[in-house]
Image (cartoon, rainbow, N blue to C red):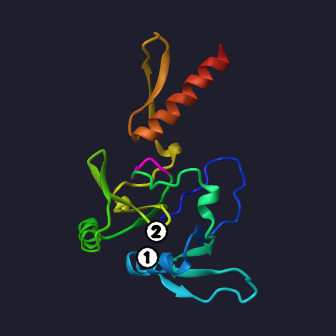
Amino acid sequence: MMEIEEVNNYVSLPLLSLNHVSLLCRSVWDSMRFYEEVLGFIPIKRPSSFKFNGAWLYNYNIGIHLIENPLIDDFDTIIEPRPINPKDNHISFQCRDVEIVKGRLEDIGMKYVTAVVEDEGNTVDQVFFHDPDGYMIELCNCENIPILPLSACLFKPRMSSFGRAVFGPAKCGFVENAMMESLSMDMLDISF
């Protein structure tokens, strides 16, 4: 597992990893069945002091905590199922074989959307679908794109359309480029 070396002056919190994701659901049993049968999670014991209906599931070094709230629609203004939109909030899991995932989803009649991300010759295949409560799930082979801290990206000056020098990336992806260009522009604005 790769860890990113701290490169700023801030003292980071003593975090170890993501522990769990907690989700409100209409039916604990429907959601448990989905997370067990589709994603391979295993129900585990939860604290006996909890006085509400819920379930804890675990696998892949992450927990899913389900909290039943049959009135969930009272809090959500969108009652109709949302379209599957890769740019919506979602939980992402890495997988070994996206084609197997798609076949499995087709076998159980589940709707999904695919996307492909390319960066410097690396390709990531993504599959997006909803759980029974409309939460977006992504399964991907995201490990195909290296994790590079922005500080690892090399930047070289270039001219913008306004004739001012702007620092642009030489070896970074789109998001890193956009962030650094925005930062560079903000710094130029401050300096004048």
- SS for dot 2: loop
Question: Between residues 184 and 35, which one lies in front from this camera angle?
Answer: 35
Examine the image and state in which quarter residue 140 appears.
Answer: bottom left
Q: Position of residue 190 (x, y in %)?
A: 67, 20
Position of 99 with respect to 149 (left or right) is: left
Q: Is residue 85 magenta?
A: yes
Q: CA distance from mark 1 to mark 2?
A: 7 Å
Placement of 163 over or under 78, stated as above or below = above
Q: Which mark is residue 132?
A: 2
Question: Between residues 190 and 114, which one lies in front from this camera angle?
Answer: 114
Examine the image and state in which quarter residue 145 appears.
Answer: bottom left
Q: The disc labelled 2 sits on which kind of residue? A: Pro
Q: Which residue lies at the image location 57% right of the left edge and 30% below the top edge?
A: 183
Q: Which residues are magenta?
A: 84-88
Q: Label 1 crowding class (10 Å Cα cut-off): few <14, some 14-19, many 20+?
A: some
Q: Position of residue 144 (x, y in %)?
A: 33, 58
Examine the image and state in which quarter residue 22 appears.
Answer: bottom right
Q: Which residue lies at the image location 70% right of the left edge and 47% below the top edge?
A: 9
Placement of 58 over or under 72, stated as above or below = below
Placement of 49 over or under 122, stated as above or below = below
Q: Position of residue 92 (x, y in %)?
A: 45, 62
* Magenta stretch prevailing secondary structure: loop
Is tag 1's residue or tag 2's residue first in the polypeptide sequence?
1
Does residue 125 appear anywhere in the picture?
no
Q: Label 2 crowding class (10 Å Cα cut-off): few <14, some 14-19, many 20+?
A: some
Does residue 109 appear anywhere in the picture?
yes
Q: Are marks 1 and 2 in contact (CB under 8 Å)?
A: yes
Q: The disc labelled 1 sits on which kind of residue? A: Phe
Q: Position of residue 40 (x, y in %)?
A: 41, 80
Q: Which residue is mark 1?
A: 34
Position of 160 with respect to 103 (left or right) is: right
Quarter of the image for the C terminus: give it.
Answer: top right
